[in-house]
Image (cartoon, rainbow, N blue to C red):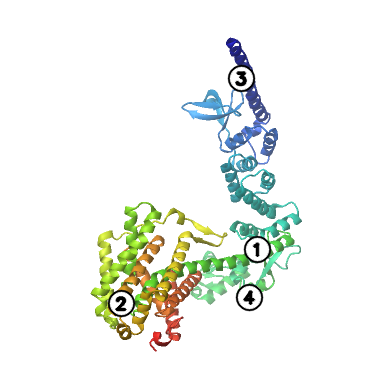
Amino acid sequence: MLRALFLALALILGLCLPASRAVAQDAGQDLQAILQTHAEEVASPGRRSVGTVIDALTASGLPGVPLFLERWADRSVYQRSGDGLFYYAEKQGNEYALSDIATGEAAGTAPASEMTEIRPNGGVRRVIGTALVQFQLSDPDIARRTAALDAISRSPEADQLEPLRNSIEGETDAGLLARKERLVGMLAARYGDTQEARIAAIEALSDAIAVDVRAVLNQILTTRPGVAAELPEGANIARTLTPGDDLTEAEAYAQLVEAGLAPAAQTPAQIKAALTDNIDGGSVGGVPIGQLATEAGRDRAYAALADAGTVPARVTEDDVETALASHVFYEEYTESDSAITDAAREALDEIETRVALNQALDLGLDALSLASIYFLAAIGLAITFGVMGVINMAHGEFIMMGAYTGYVVQQIIPDYTLSLIVALPLAFAVTFGAGVAMERLVIRWLYHRPLETLLATFGISIALQQLAKNIFGTQARPLTSPSWLDGAWVINDVVSIANIRIAIFVLALIFLGLILFVLNKTRLGLEVRAVTQNPGMAASMGINPDKINMLTFGLGSGIAGIAGVAIGLYAKVTSEMGADYIVQSFMTVVVGGVGNVWGTLAGAGLIGILQKGIEFFNPSNTLAAQTYMILFIILFIQFRPKGIVALKGRAAGD
């Protein structure tokens, strides 16, 4: 029984294996047969005639056709001179290792002298590539389908439209499906069969704002310059040009010369060369050489030569003006159908309007993001300077201390999310302690002495910068954000904002709410406001002004430390990073309104919008943008010295 089963299995295998080999051989023979039918064209293809071979290969439906087209275009196909058959070959010493053209299986070796490399030229390779696209667009491998779409995007051709349309129905990936549909629309706009089809495709594109869509419409609206005695009938004229306004008179006349409608004007060098070539017996055209030192003498000599027909007549300014006045200059669309260019112009205008609105939105998001950074940097100063009236030039160094605290925590805790959670309260504790120490040791002795306070805190800022350099060096240190903050929130092709900026904006809102809660809803906030408005009366009510000043200064410094961690995730962490924010922080507090948290928010918003607006008009010079911003703020405080949100009543010191 077992022996019978074994014999039956052997019989089945014996029948199946030859059959599979026969199928492979038949497939290989079919592909080889097609190539042999067109052997001369395969071996020496031409751009216009190669289509016959490609049509035959495509119609065969053989599985080896895509690989052959790919290898053919890559110049990896060889022909053996002995039998004229085609192979894939790889050189090994003085021989070639051959592979079957259909199955890819090893087919022995051949000496190099018998193998001829098939080398299609660039035009043929482009034709082969176009044919290969229709296979790649429906390839089971998504990477190959994506590569095919990339190739079409880089070099769109009219004959890619139908293969692309045919591949849409079987597309399973939603992202690639949307991309294929958009590419079909763009190709149809340029290469559609009828006017109606092209206009419909153009109108459909008007809903998009992508760069490639705008590029397609601009290609349809491509113009070429023209000049004629009258506007040519039937031409699709984009606009007429006026010499002196739309183009210079020199450019207009050069266009006339290029079109053969006017003689070229002689340059001084050409006139000099003509006079030199026609010296005859000490004179030129009857004018003695000695008189050629003046322009009038050269003009007479050249005019005499022109009258004799020796040189071309000189083109005068009057000749140029007459030629310009007697011709019309224009730009003509390369697309001859005016209905298509009108549709493209209308669609592009709609798109550009939406792009402008989205650019304004993107600029607003950038300004809001920058305002949140300035608010975080300035909120601590709003307490120490705005509430307490202390000019703390070392506020930027507290921001720097917070950033370096975050860096040190990341060296100890490699998990960036956990290190960030630990770094925020630790940075507050470190800078709170540093602020309390500075208030107890220096600031408490200098209240109501602003000049001495400014000088003392400026000296402390320099000392803290040098201390940071001694500890961490002068190179920027990385403060890495967690992976969930990587990337950006992309709304469309124009509007996007980095996730880290969104996080800083959210943090700024949290601190706004926290500061308002502390100042308005807690005993500490009540005592801070009491000591700020009337220290003597507050002391008589049992409040210790020295303690409140110490805690308030420490609170402002601690908030600066937390701001340093947030800013360090976005900007560089160096010993000088505080200097980058101290000026903006003071401007934010002063412009917004001293002593008012809402004013600080308003000031940050104004400065952020102003700086981004100036940078939009002058993006290549950020230093100039900051200069203009400072000048604007100087003018602003001349008209509103108490800021946007000015304190009133007793709190304002009136």
Residue on which disc 1 sits? 348
Q: CA distance from mark 1 to mark 2?
A: 62 Å
* The quarter of the displayed image where residue 196 is located: bottom right
Rendered position, 286 above or below 203: below
In the foreground, 621 or 80: 621
In the foreground, 262 or 79: 79
Q: Mark 1, mark 4: which one is toward the viewer?
A: 1
Q: Earlier in the sequence, mark 3 or mark 1?
A: 3
Q: Residues within 10 Å of mark 2 (few under 14, many from 20)?
A: many
- Look at the numbered discs 1 and 4 and tell me whether their residues touch, using CB distance below 8 Å: no
Q: Earlier in the sequence, mark 1 or mark 4?
A: 4
- x and y percentages locating residue 54 in the rendered image: 67, 37
Q: Mark 3, mark 1: which one is toward the viewer?
A: 3
Identify the secondary structure beneath mark 3: helix
Task: Give the amino acid type for the residue marked by disc 3 in the picture.
Answer: Leu
Residue on which disc 3 sits? 17
Q: Mark 1, mark 2: which one is toward the viewer?
A: 2
* The quarter of the displayed image where residue 313 is located: bottom right
Q: Earlier in the sequence, mark 3 or mark 4?
A: 3
Question: Any mark on residue 318, and which?
Answer: 4
Q: Mark 2, mark 4: which one is toward the viewer?
A: 2
Q: CA distance from mark 3 to mark 4?
A: 93 Å
Rendered position, 239 above or below 181: below
Q: CA distance from mark 2 to mark 4?
A: 85 Å
Identify the secondary structure beneath mark 1: helix
Task: Give the amino acid type for the residue marked by disc 2 in the picture.
Answer: Asn
Question: Any mark on residue 549, and which?
Answer: 2
